Image (tube, helix red, strand yellow):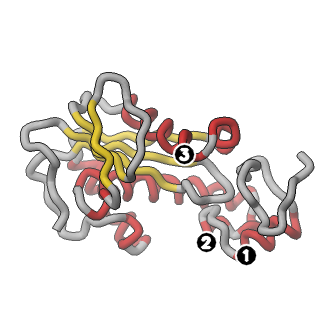
Amino acid sequence: MLLPYLSKGVIEAGCDEAGRGCLAGAVFAAAVILPPDFSNELLNDSKQLSEKKRYELRPIIEREALSWAIGIVSPEEIDKINILRASFLAMHRAIDQLSIRPEHLLIDGNRFTPYPEIAHSTIIKGDGKYLSIAAASVLAKTYRDDYMMELDTKHPGYHWKENKGYPTKAHREAIRNIGITSYHRKTFTLLPEQLSFDF
């Protein structure tokens, strides 16, 4: 059973990211403020849910949340600042867009770059513990999946519709055979035998 909040009576925003371990595409994050009495039996860490369930939950979260937002950091920015910083930046961008200012942030994971003037708690596997983080995980994942499916129409050879940019065998074979796109993260090890790419 996921918890509705960490501290009663405090406006909390749950934050989570999607796409950190991918070889291609932007990293997405979501920030979600749920009403304190929100409940949904289906809601769980997005990785525990089927794709169908995630897309069923998205409109419910969007409708019932007090506020929600998505933050995006591009592959170019990831290559400049590294993926960990990019994940935190994506969360900051999501928080920036919330229509209600939270008093506390619940961050999935064990590290975070503090957001100006808002306290935060990092919670390992928080998406399986708190409703607001689970809701953020569903939004971040589904919006990123939509984006990768759209990119797949431009670059069908990489099987992004299926792998969403993650390092599957088919994705790596495509990199080996076709080369890379502008959406690939050039600072990542795109191929196991890679020493360097000529860009």
- Residue 161 at x, y percent in the picture: 62, 67
- Label 1 CA crowd tier, 10 Å (few <14, some 14–19, many 20+): some
Relative to the observer, which residue lies in front, 57 or 189?
189
The quadrant where residue 158 appears: bottom right
**Lateral position of residue 35 relative to residue 25, left or right:** left
- Residue 135 at x, y percent in the picture: 30, 55
Q: CA distance from mark 3 to mark 1?
A: 26 Å
Q: Amino acid at mark 3?
A: Leu
- Label 2 CA crowd tier, 10 Å (few <14, some 14–19, many 20+): some
Relative to the observer, which residue lies in front, 143 or 48?
48
User: Which numbered disc flags the more N-terminal residue, 3 or 2?
Assistant: 3
Residue 170: mark in rendering = 1
- Label 3 CA crowd tier, 10 Å (few <14, some 14–19, many 20+): few
Residue 162: mark in rendering = 2
Q: CA distance from mark 1 to mark 2?
A: 10 Å
Q: Secondary structure at mark 3?
A: helix
**Lateral position of residue 155 relative to residue 93, left or right:** right
Q: Secondary structure at mark 1?
A: helix
Please say if the residues under marks 1 and 2 sit with CB atoms less than 8 Å apart. Answer: yes
What residue is pinned by disc 3? 84
